[in-house]
Amino acid sequence: MKILVTGGVGFIGSHTVVELDKAGFEPVIIDNLYNSDLEVLKGIKQITGKDFPFYNIDCNDIEKIRSLFEKEKFDGVIHFAAYKAVGESVDKPLDYYENNLISLLVLLRVMKEFNVKNFVFSSSCTVYGQPDKLPVTELTPRKPATSPYGNTKAIAEDIIRDHVYSAPGIKAICLRYFNPIGAHESALIGELPNGVPSNLVPFITQTAAGLRESLTVFGDDYDTPDGTCIRDFIHVLDLANAHVKALELLNEKQDSDYYDVFNVGTGEGYTVLELINTFQEVNGVKLNYTIGPRREGDVEKIYAQSDKVNNIMKWKAEKTMAEALRDAWNWQLKITPKK
Ligand code: UD1
């Protein structure tokens, strides 16, 4: 089955391409390289031994997307391509709404025109805001988004749901990711942040590699065992595999208006300090860090209840946080320029 992977050169997209190939799907990658690097395709080739079709196309360009759908006969679409920096989205909300929502509308429209039925969307646990009760299940009410980025995810979920219920034939799954970390165990692909990383693990690996002086831990006065925030850190390969399972589930579904959302997390929460300590232990490196003030907009604690994805999709996180941190470090060592 031929699957269009938008943003397939990015962090989660590239790992998903590898997992799709392993499961017998044929990925076709599009990416506008806004926040990704063509070198990643070499890594994918080294892992899989294959050159998957790649097109430098922006998902907002409906004519190019149409031409692509004419050329390649897709059986499904996994839509990763989006802007994803929470802080930047506060400064440039229009860019975020335009890029993240128009691209979605274009894809859904063209899928309908070409009768492509299966759609998997990258959503985020950010749609829960700070939940009143933990762990969060898919029935936990969504909260108003704390950033335009988060709002694009919530609006996108609604658009997809409304479209599925109005257009018989299309089936869709939104995956609500918790915090993806790590890299492929081969260290041939991994995360390539643009500029100063805003996410925790790339900042840690760059600091440990000497590219940054020190990590600031944003706040140690939260209501958690050590005062730092709690997150559900999931290995990116496990997350990638959830997309394969989502496609398999969509294929099985006979009802023509199937729509569902799934949490994709490990079900376990760890504090930022626990993650830092695990990173140091598993890799035998010392990390410079200081405690700083809280970062505006951060949620105190969130982790998934993953029963639904375990039971319905038959998916479970297999890798530990320690493995993810080892893989992230090996990847950082591979890409750090030698002095
Ligand atoms: C955020 C979004 C998530 C989105 C992700 C993409 C929210 C609630 N979550 O995740 O939906 O998919 O960004 O980028 O909007 N930290 C430090 N020092 C640092 C960096 C981070 O202490 O230099 C801490 C943060 O305070 C947080 C944890 O590490 O407690 C994880 O932060 P990060 O990796 O940025 O992810 P989230 O904010 O959880």
Image (cartoon, rainbow, N blue to C red):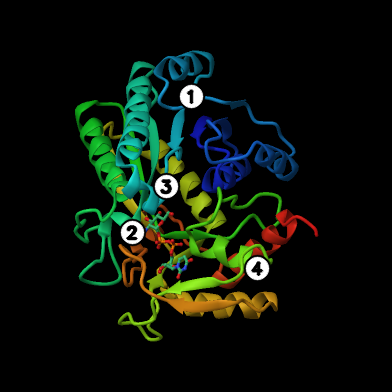
Q: Residue 308: which disc? A: 2
In the rendered image, residue 26, in percent from the top left (x then y), is placed at 59, 32
Mark 2 C-beta to ligand 1 under 8 Å: no
The residue wearing badge 3 is 84
Residue drawn at 34 percent across, 53 percent down: 262
> The residue tagged with tag 4: helix, strand or loop?
helix
Mark 3 Cβ and ligand 1 under 8 Å apart: yes
Identified by mark 3, the residue type is Lys
Query: Which residue: 58% across, 39% down?
Result: 9
| Residue bearing mark 1 | 74
Which x, y percent locates residue 329?
A: 66, 65
Q: Residue at x 26, y 61 (%)?
A: 129
Q: Secondary structure at mark 3?
A: loop
Label 3 crowd (10 A; few <14 / some 14-19 / many >=20)? some
| Mark closer to the observer (2, 3) | 3
**Disc 1 crowd, CA 10 A, few/some/many (<14, 14-19, 20+):** many
Ligand 1 closer than 8 Å to label 1 CB: no
Q: Amino acid at mark 2?
A: Lys
For the residue pair 116 and 39, the one nearer the viewer reads as 39
Ligand 1 is found in the corner quadrant, namely bottom left
Q: Amino acid at mark 1?
A: Phe
Q: Are marks 2 and 3 in contact (CB under 8 Å)?
A: no
The residue that disc 4 covers is: 326
**First reached walking from the N terminus: tag 3 or tag 4:** 3
In the rendered image, which quarter contains the C terminus? bottom right
